[in-house]
Image (spheres, rainbow, N blue to C red):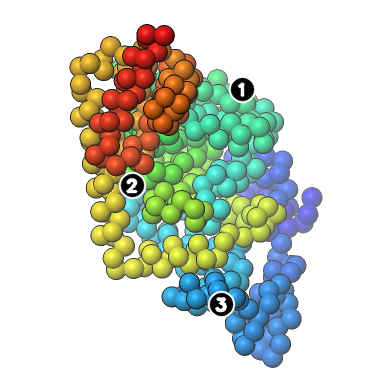
């Protein structure tokens, strides 16, 4: 093992041995080099005032070389903020501003000990880093039966984790904290589990209420007290899009510092929060009572970034930072929020039509981009295929009964027609 990795591991052991036990083999071996091209380039940037022949970019007239066909279209930004490499951990100011945003939007984080967000290539990359750091073959990765299918690729296929699903909803259509508890305590002999919490949920658009949130936190704490090391990941992809009476902040705040056997991690990003999907700017943030543990985990995360994508795209980080600092940002974001909320409310009003009761129920939704129909009389895949070929309507089939509808990408005035066509598609299938 590289001595630098060994030093990081010793820091984690000294600060919280349970966190060390959570690490995968790769998590224990990975590190970010203190010596090498990047560190030597950084030293040269600070001290080589005459000639700096270290940087793997081309310069001209003291700035990064560039083409005017590109710069002319991006002239609001300086070449230094576009063309050179961003640091592997991300632009320092962007990390600082995002951390301040987290504190403002999550009051439960006040007085909690958590690190500086590390920039990722959006949220999938952040989840992949967590999988690399904490999942070995056979390790339990727990998340509900209503989930984003990429979890299976990220934790299961890539890292050979063992997927443990539990029903998302109880019979009363509230969050199934008892199911989460059962799945967690089934890992007591192994002593370790990774739990993924995704609110607002993809595909259902559900966010638990305050009482349900407290129940989730209580279950995690109970498992830790029973001797289970729990890496609990808040996948906050759709954070902020809370339309009704639900949690209005990430559970990361309540999970941070909960118990020495609980490592809370927040995965979030500008992609959906700020409506910049293609910019691919995400963040990974660790919580720990021990500053050395935080520093070591961030170093290991940056090591994985260096070993995979090297660093995130600089222009995207610049654009996001500029937007977050703009005086108009808050008002413009609120305007888009109201549009999304209007679409969600319109869908609920449409679904109250009694004629729909015979062909579908729907899962609770109060947030995010999506809602899910639970079909009663036809299979989801048969309906999906019929809709797309007969009516030019695209939906997502999930299992036998569930049909996901992304109201996020349908104008409010078209929603009634959309659901009428879905209903008509079901009637068509009945007559075949």
Cβ–Cβ under 8 Å for marks 2 and 1: no
Q: Name above or below for residue 239 compared with residue 102.
A: above
In the picture of the structure, the residue carrying the numbered disc 2 is 240
User: Which residue shows up at 49% across the image and 56% down it?
Assistant: 279
Q: Is residue 77 above or below residue 32?
A: below
Residue 98 location, quadrant: bottom left
Q: Which residue is mark 1?
A: 189
The numbered mark at residue 68 is 3
- Label 2: few (<14), some or many (≥20) within 10 Å? many
Question: In this view, which residue lies farthest toward the bottom?
Answer: 50
Question: Do callouts 3 and 2 mark residues in contact (Cβ within 8 Å)?
Answer: no
CB-based contact (under 8 Å), mark 3 and mark 1: no
- At 52% across and 42% down in the image, what residue appears? 263
Q: Is residue 219 left or right of residue 306?
A: left
Q: Nearer the viewer, residue 403 or 422?
A: 422
- Secondary structure under tag 3 reads helix
Q: Residues within 10 Å of mark 1 (few under 14, many from 20)?
A: few
Label 2 or label 1, whichever comes before in sequence order: 1
Q: Residue at x 78, y 54 (%)?
A: 2
What number is the disc on residue 64?
none
- In the rendering, at what x and y percent does residue 396 appear? 45, 29
Instruction: Classify residue 215 as left or right of residue 382.
Output: left
Q: Quadrant of residue 357?
A: top left
Task: Determine the secondary structure under disc 1.
Answer: loop
Answer left or right for 391 relative to 159.
Answer: left
């Amino acid at each position: 093992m590289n001595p630098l990795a060994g030093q990081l591991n010793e820091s984690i052991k000294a600060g919280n041995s349970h966190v060390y036990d959570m690490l995968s083999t790769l998590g224990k071996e990975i590190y970010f080099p203190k010596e090498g091209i990047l560190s030597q380039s950084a030293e040269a940037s600070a001290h080589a005032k005459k000639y700096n022949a270290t940087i793997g970019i081309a310069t001209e007239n003291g700035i990064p070389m560039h083409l005017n066909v590109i710069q002319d279209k991006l002239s609001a930004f300086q070449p230094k903020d576009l063309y050179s490499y961003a640091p592997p951990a991300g632009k320092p100011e962007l990390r600082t501003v995002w951390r301040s945003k987290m504190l403002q939007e999550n009051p439960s984080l006040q007085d909690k000990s958590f690190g500086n967000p590390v920039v990722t290539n959006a949220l999938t990359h952040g989840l992949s880093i967590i999988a690399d750091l904490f999942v070995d073959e056979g390790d339990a990765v727990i998340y509900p039966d209503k989930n984003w299918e990429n979890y299976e690729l990220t934790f299961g296929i890539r890292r050979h984790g063992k997927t443990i699903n539990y029903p998302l909803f109880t019979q009363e259509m509230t969050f199934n904290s008892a199911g989460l508890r059962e799945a967690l305590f089934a890992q007591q002999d192994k002593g370790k589990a990774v739990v993924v919490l995704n609110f607002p949920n993809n595909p259902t658009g559900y966010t638990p209420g305050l009482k349900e949130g407290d129940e989730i936190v209580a279950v995690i704490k109970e498992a830790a007290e029973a001797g289970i090391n729990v890496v609990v990941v808040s996948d906050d992809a759709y954070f902020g899009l809370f339309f009704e009476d639900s949690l209005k902040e990430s559970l990361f705040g309540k999970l941070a510092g909960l118990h020495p056997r609980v490592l809370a991690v927040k995965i979030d990003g500008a992609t959906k929060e700020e409506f910049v999907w293609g910019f691919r700017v995400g963040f990974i943030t660790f919580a720990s009572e021990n500053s050395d543990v935080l520093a070591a985990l961030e170093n290991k995360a940056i090591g994985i970034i260096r070993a995979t994508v090297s660093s995130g795209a600089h222009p995207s980080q610049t654009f996001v930072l500029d937007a977050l600092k703009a005086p108009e940002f808050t008002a413009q974001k609120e305007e888009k929020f109201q549009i999304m909320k209007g679409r969600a409310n319109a869908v609920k009003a449409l679904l109250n039509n009694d004629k729909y009761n015979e062909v579908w129920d729907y899962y609770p939704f109060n947030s995010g981009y999506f809602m899910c129909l639970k079909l009663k009389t036809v299979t989801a895949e048969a309906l999906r295929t019929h809709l797309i070929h007969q009516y030019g309507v695209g939906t997502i089939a999930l299992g036998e009964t569930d049909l996901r509808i992304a109201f996020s990408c349908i104008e409010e005035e078209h929603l009634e027609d959309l659901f009428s066509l879905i209903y008509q598609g079901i009637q068509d299938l009945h007559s075949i």
